[in-house]
Image (cartoon, rainbow, N blue to C red):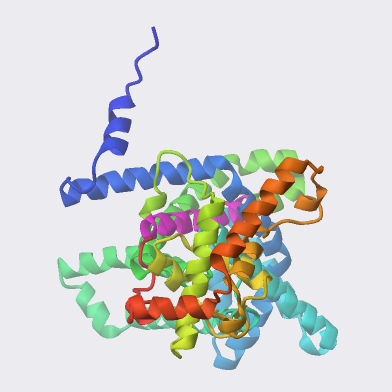
Amino acid sequence: MHPINPWRPLFQWIWNADLRSVPTAQRAVVMALRITYVVLRDLLHGQLNLRAMSLVYTTLLSLVPLLAVSFSVLKGFGVHNQIEPLLLQAFAPLGEKGHEIAERILSFVANVKVGVLGSLGLVLLMYTVISLLQKIESAFNFVWRVDRLRGFSERFSNYLSVILVGPVLVFGALGITASVTSNAFVHRLLTIEPLGAMLVELGRLLPYVLVCGAFSFLYILIPNTRVRLRAALTGGLVGGVLWQTAGWGFARFIVTSSSKYAAIYSSFAILILLLIWLYLSWLVLLLGAQVAFYVQHPQYVSLERVQLRISNRLKEHLALAVMALIGVNHYADRRPWDVDELAAYLHMPGETIARVLRILIDLGLVVETCDERSRFLPARDIGNIALVDLIAGVRAAEEDRFLAESQLSRLGPVDDLMQSIEAGIGQGLGRTSVRDLVLGLLQAEPVAATPADVTPGDDR
C-alpha cells in the first residue's frame, strides 16, 4: 500500500477549485496559493538562480562605475553626500562588514576622475553601466517570456532616465521624507496619543513602503512589455517584503556565522558574504517579477510548467492574420500595431506573436519602427506580396544549413508528393496578394483591426 499523503486534499482543493464559482475571498486565497506553488517550482527549476548569479558578477563590475555616474549627477543637485547613508542601508544586513564595504566603494567612487580617465575611459565607464542595465533587462525579459531587447533608441532613453533621473528621484523622495519627519508640526503630533503611536508604527513601515515602491517602479520600467500597475504593485509588495525579511534574516546569520566564515576564508570572508547578499537581493527581485508576471497572466498558472509549442498550421494561420492586420492599418492609414496589441487582438501569448513577427521580418515582409515602442509596417507594397510566397516562406522558416530540406536523401515518391502539395498550395492561392486579403477583411469587418479597440495588457 502507498502511504497516505496528508497534503493531497489541500493540493486537490487548490488545483481542482473552479475559480469562477467560488467567493471572491476564497478565489484570492486559492490564486495566491497557486502562484506561490508555480513561483517555487520555477525557482527549483534553476533558471532564476542562474540569472541571479549572472547579475551578481555584472554588479561587481558595474557597481563603482554606476555610483560614479550617479555621484556626478547628484553633485549637480547638491545631494551627493546622501549616497553614503543609502549605501550603508543597502549593506546593513552585512553588519559591521557592510559599513567597511560601503566605505571602500565610496573611496573607489571618489577616485574616479573623468579628466584622468580620458575619452576612452569615459566610454568604457558608460559601457559598463549600460551593460548592467542591459543584463537586468534581459533577466526581466526572461521572466516575462520576452525574447528580444528594446530597440536602440528606446533602450538609450530608458537607460539614460534610470542613470540620470533615477538617483535624483530616489534622493528627492528620501529628502522629502526626512524633512517631514523632522518637521515641528510632526513632532507635536507625536506627543498626542494614540496618534503618536500610530505615526511611530507608520515610520517603521516606511522602509518597506519605499522598497516596495522602488521594486514596483522597476517592474514597470525594465521589462520590454507592458506591465499593468496592479501586477507591478503586487510583485513590488511581495518582493519588497521578501527583501526586507531576507535582510533581517541575513543580519541574524552574520551575527551567528560570520566568525566561522572568517576562520575558513580569512580576509576573503567579507567578499564571500557580499556575494551571498548580492545573490539573495537579485533573486528576491526576480521572484517579485515572477509574481507580477503570473498576476498579469493567470493563464500561465498551471500545475505543470507551460511550454508554448506552435504547430505548423497555427504558425501559417498566425502569419496570415498578423500580415493582414498590419496591412489593414497601413492601408487605412492607422497607427501601426505593436506586439502587445496584436497579441491581445488575436488572443494569443505575446511570445508567440513575437516569434511570428520575427519570421515575417526575416522574410523581408515586415519592418520594425524606431518609435518608443516598436511597431510594425509592411516592408513593401502589400499589392506586391503574394500569399503563395508568404506561405512558402513561413513553411521554410527557421531552416538553416545544418537542418534543411536540401540535406534529405532523395526518395522519389515522397519527393513527388511534396511537390504535389506545393503545387496544390500554389493553385489554391493563385495570384492573391496581401492587398486582396486586406480588402476582403475591410469589407467583412469595416472597423476591425484598430489598436484603439484593444485594451493594452489584456489577458490572452
Counting from the top left corner in percent of width and height, residue 21 is at 17, 46
Q: Quadrant of the C terminus?
A: bottom left
Counting from the top left corner in percent of width and height, residue 35 is at 38, 47
Which span is picked out in magenta? Answer: 276-297
Residue drawn at the location 43% of the way across and 60% of the way down: 348
Counting from the top left corner in percent of width and height, residue 231 is at 37, 63
Residue drawn at the location 62% of the way across and 44% of the way down: 258
Q: Is residue 358 visible?
A: no
The one of 27 and 457 positioned closer to us in this rendering: 457
Q: Is residue 410 magenta?
A: no
Residue 357 image-quadrant placement: bottom right
Q: Is residue 280 magenta?
A: yes
Q: Is residue 195 left or right of residue 313?
A: left
The one of 176 and 404 positioned closer to us in this rendering: 404
Residue drawn at the location 50% of the way across and 70% of the way down: 322
Q: Is residue 249 left or right of residue 297?
A: right
Q: Is residue 66 visible?
A: yes
Counting from the top left corner in percent of width and height, residue 139 is at 59, 60
Residue drawn at the location 48% of the way across and 63% of the way down: 350
